[in-house]
Structure formats: C-alpha cells, structure tokens
Amino acid sequence: MGDIRLLPDVLASQVAAGEVVERPASVVKELVENSIDAGASRITVEFLRGGTRLIRVADDGRGMDRSDALLSIERHATSKIRESADLAAIMTLGFRGEALPSIASVCRFRMFTQRREDKAGTVLEVLGGKLHEVRECGEPPGTRIEVGDLFFNVPARRKFLRGEQTEAAHLLKQIETLAVAYPRISFVCLRDDKEVFRLASTEDLAVRLRDLHGEDFLKLLVPVPCLERDGVRVHGWIARPGEGRTDRAQQMLFVNGRMIRSPVLSMPLREASDGMLAKGLHPPAILFFEMDPAAVDCNVHPAKREVRFRDPGLLRSVTLAAARAAWERAFPSQITPGSALPDPLFPPITRSEGLSPSFANQGEFLTGRNFLPSRGDESPQDVSESPLSIPRYLGMLSSRYLLFEEQGSLTMVEIRAARERLLYESFLARLATGELESQQLLMPEILEMSPADLAWIDAHRSILHAAGLVAESFGRASLKVDAVPAAVSLLPVMEIVVRLVDELRTLGDSPELDRYGREALASSVSRLAASGARMPSGEVGAVMLLRELLACDLPYATPAGRPTMTQISSGELQRRFMA
Ligand code: ADP
Ligand code: MG
C-alpha cells in the first residue's frame, strides 16, 4: 500500500490554520472581518494577555441559526460564494470558508449567535477542533466568538508567539487598520479589561483618524481628492512634503475595503514623492481604492494580504496621479492673485473634501447593500475667495529666515532651503535638454585623490560632465579639474568635487544613477550652490525670492524634503495668545 492518505479533518484544519492563523492578531482579523461581512454596525474586541489567553469578538450583525452555526465551523463552509464564477466578483472580505474551522482547531472555541428573527440562539463549544457541545441559549442578536488559549494543542506554534506586549501591539494595529477602513462601524477595544478605545461611528475618515491617532497625526497629512479613471476610484490622505518615513509602516492601502501590500501601489507613491521627500523615504498614506471586484484577484494569499490586479498599469498611473493631485492642490504652485498661502503647519483639517461619503459606504459596498458610487470628480475647492493681497516683508531673522506678513498671518522662509528648491528646478529644467553650465578655470586645478575616488570619477565622467564638472585622473593619485559647475564657481574646487562625488556615490551604481541621474545631479548641485549663495538684499530681494519660490513646481520643500517655508495663520497666533 502506498504512503499517501487523506488527512483527518482536524489535522487538515490545523495545517490550514498555519496559513491563516499566525498569531492572535490574525484571529482578530478573521473574526472582525466576519463581523463586517455580517453587516455589523458595532464591534467589540476584548483580549487578555496579548490575545494568547483570550480573544473575544462580539458584533450586532445578522447572526446565524443553529444549522448555519454548525456549518460555519466545517471546512470550506461559506455563505459567501456558491460557484466558481462568484470567485471573480467577491463583494465580501471572506470567501474561503476556512477561517472559523482553522481557528477552532487550534484553541478552546466558543460561539454565541442569534438571528434577530429567532427566539433562541445557539452556543457552540469546540475544543481543539472537536465539537464539544451545542445548546440553545438566549442572546442579544448578533454573534460573539471566544478564542481561548490559542495554540494550546499545537505547542510548536505556541512557541513561536512573541511576548504579550508584542502580540498585543500587533493585535491593536490590526484593529486600528480595520477601524480606519470602516469608519461607519463603531469599535470598542478592551485590553486586559481596560478600555483602549471607543470609536463612535462616523461618515468622515478624518474624524476616525483623529479619534485613533490624535490631532497631530492629521496635521501630517493632506487630503487626496477623489480621482476616478477607467473604473478605478481612489481617495484618502497622504503625507505633507518633508514627512517621509524610512519604512512603509504608515502606509495603509485598501483595495475594496481590504488592506493589502502591493508594489503596484507603493512604488508609484514613492515615485510621486521624488523631489518632495528625501530619496529612499516613503510617504505615509491612507488610500482607498475601489474598483469592480472582477478587476482584482484576492485569492492569491492565504491571509489575503496580497492581490493581483488585472491592469496593474492602470493602478500605477491612478496612484501616481492621485498623489500628485493631492500635493498640487494642497500646495498650489503659483501665487495666484488673492490666494492665501496654504498653511503647511496648520491646515484646515476639518474640511472633508476628498472624503466623499462613498468611502464611508465601503462596509455596505462590500456586503452588497446599496452601493451608490458618488462621482469622484467634484470640482476642486475654490481657493480664490480672499481679496488680493501681496505678502509684506517684515525683515530677516538670524541671517537665515525671511519674515512676511499676509492678512495677519506670519510666513517664514528659510533662505537656503528656498534657494535650493529654486536652483533645483532650474537645473532640472536645464538638464532635461542639455548640461549644466560650466565655468572654465583659469588654470586647471590638480587635487589629490584616493585611487578609489579617482576610479569612480573616471567611470562617471559623463555624468559629472553633465553637472558642469570637467575632470579626469592625472597620474595615479591626482585629479585634474578643468571646469566646475558655474552655479558653484565661487566655492573652493576641492569642496565642489568632494561633495558632488560623495553625494552621487550614495546613489550606488550606474543603473540607479541612470535612473535618478538628472534629479541627483540637480539636487547635489543645488545644495552646493545654495550653501554659497548671497543673502537676498533688502525688501526687493526678499519679495523676489518668495515669489520665485512660489512659482516653483513644488515650492514647499527642498528636493531632500526639508521645508522651505512655514506659516502661522492669524487664527493660530490668536490661539497661542489665547486671544
Ligand atoms: P468565510 O468568511 O470565508 O466565508 P469563515 O470560516 O470565516 O469563512 O466563516 C464561515 C461562515 O460563517 C461565513 O461564510 C458566514 O456565513 C458565517 N459567519 C462567520 N462569522 C459570522 C458572524 N460574525 N456573523 C454571522 N455569520 C458569520
Ligand atoms: Mg471569514
């Protein structure tokens, strides 16, 4: 007889649990998603000791009758799809019918459930995957599921759990993610019998974000106006320039109400932030993508954290356009007559443009109830209401900041950062068609260099040439410099070479340099040039600098993401003086 045999059901579920249930947070994800699918308007999550001792999720959703309750813990039992065609158009968060049996096979499991229309409810107890007890009970309508002693019967998995603090952190993060995705649903969370948060139902994502993370978090963000293209709709919030992060932990990308990780969406975000954030930084973002369920395959990852898009190119371009639109709109590039400067520090956050109510409808969208997409392209907010005004120069502070007054608000410009942005854009424009202007030295300068630096410079001569630096090795350990970038010709030649080479080298090897070459050059040279620039002279120079800055494509930060200016609104001034 061969060695192949069918796994007993409990064992099969435990194997499946390995994929679906990694840790307490994944249990919470599955249970809360089920509650959302069941149309809940209020969900309570309690847990003890990082969720290892107990997780309890209670909802006021539609509940189950006795036979459905029994079926729900059978493998591949789901009410959500019936035939394979349904897989192509999933409107719910769950569809595999795998979560409950998987979870029940690795814990002490109890379910209380009752439908609104029934007189009695059902209690099920399952111990390590074996049905232990079924009885009748009287329950409020809805479903409550308790997961006790997770992995009590799978010691190998229990060993992999981290400390209670870590598991609790993952678990809370998971609830927060779901709470952001469904602001319409009220969430209550208790940790070791203490309330962590109690979130009221709201139509407005901004309110939910503030309830969860506080006012300061919202101040880091600007709204992404709703944008629609070829059946893909996106909106949400994205970081202000200069608010980049080294990882993507603060990116929440939702596709049809489900948070996913996907390079198709995160790469264009990074691309869009070129010139807004330092290289290598990611913009925090909370974006909601909605599309025909058939345009996205959710069935590629056991925990559904990844998806496959039918048209990744479309998603990419929509993401890029949305991020750019958000920044453009938040920071209009021209000082149009009468437009007040947008306030980069204290934005009017309560404005809910960009947060179309449709996004709050997602819970309903996913459960298939009255999804009425609102047209996403509402006309942009009109900023030209205030009377024409010209910023008035007040003076210079510490030889470093220019101060302006405009309609009672105070604008501060950091001179060097402003110069850097200005020069960067003009260099970039020049590099698009040719090379940066170079200044021939009267006499070539000979610099001592390490052989490694020399080799690098020789290998990248054409790039350096484009920056206006004409140099080549001269003997074994020296460099002959014939010309330097005109914009920095006042700086010592050694400083120019060392700083340019250092900066460009951080970009790594040629492919990177090819891709980012122009931006990198423009950015390095502008930083150099700004460091040697003269102070603006008097009022005329100061106002000119401000106007030139505001005429830039992206005036509010240097290419490396340092702010160029900041503003204190008259309201904020009053608040500070408690006036
Ligand atoms: P899936 O969500 O993939 O369908 P699950 O194993 O998570 O599979 O759940 C199985 C079934 O149990 C669901 O299809 C649903 O009908 C029912 N169910 C689970 N949780 C709830 C709940 N909180 N309220 C109502 N029904 C539920
Ligand atoms: Mg499910």
Image (tube, rainbow, N blue to C red):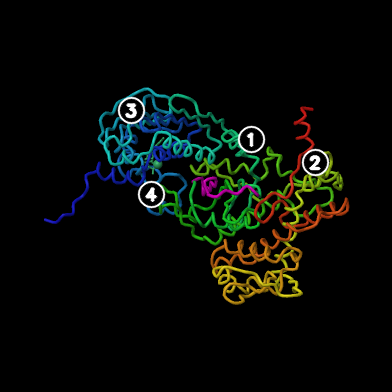
Which residue bears the numbered disc 2?
A: 410
Which is closer to the viewer, label 2 or label 1?
A: 2
Q: Earlier in the sequence, mark 1 or mark 3?
A: 3
Q: Secondary structure at mark 3?
A: strand
Which residue is disc 4 drawn over? 302
Q: Looking at the rendering, which quadrant does residue 545 occupy? A: bottom right
- Mark 2–mark 1 Cα distance, whole angstroms, equals 22 Å
Callout 4 secondary element: loop
Left or right position of 369 against 74: right
Residue flagged by tag 1: what amino acid is it?
A: Glu
Residue 50 location in percent, x, y?
40, 33
**Sequence order check, earlier mark of 3 and 4:** 3
Q: Are marks 1 and 3 in contact (CB under 8 Å)?
A: no
Q: Nearer the viewer, mark 3 or mark 4?
A: 4
Ligand 1 position by quadrant = top left
Q: Is residue 379 at all visible to an observer of this figure? A: no
Check whether the beta carbons of the residues at disc 3 and disc 2 lie within 8 A of each other.
Answer: no
Looking at mark 4, is its residue's CB closer than 8 Å to ligand 1?
no
- First along the sequence among labels 2 and 1: 1
- Amino acid type, residue under disc 4 in the picture: Pro
Viewer-side residue, 315 vs 85: 315
| 107 vs 195: above or below | below
Q: What residue is disc 1 on?
A: 215
Q: Are marks 1 and 4 in contact (CB under 8 Å)?
A: no
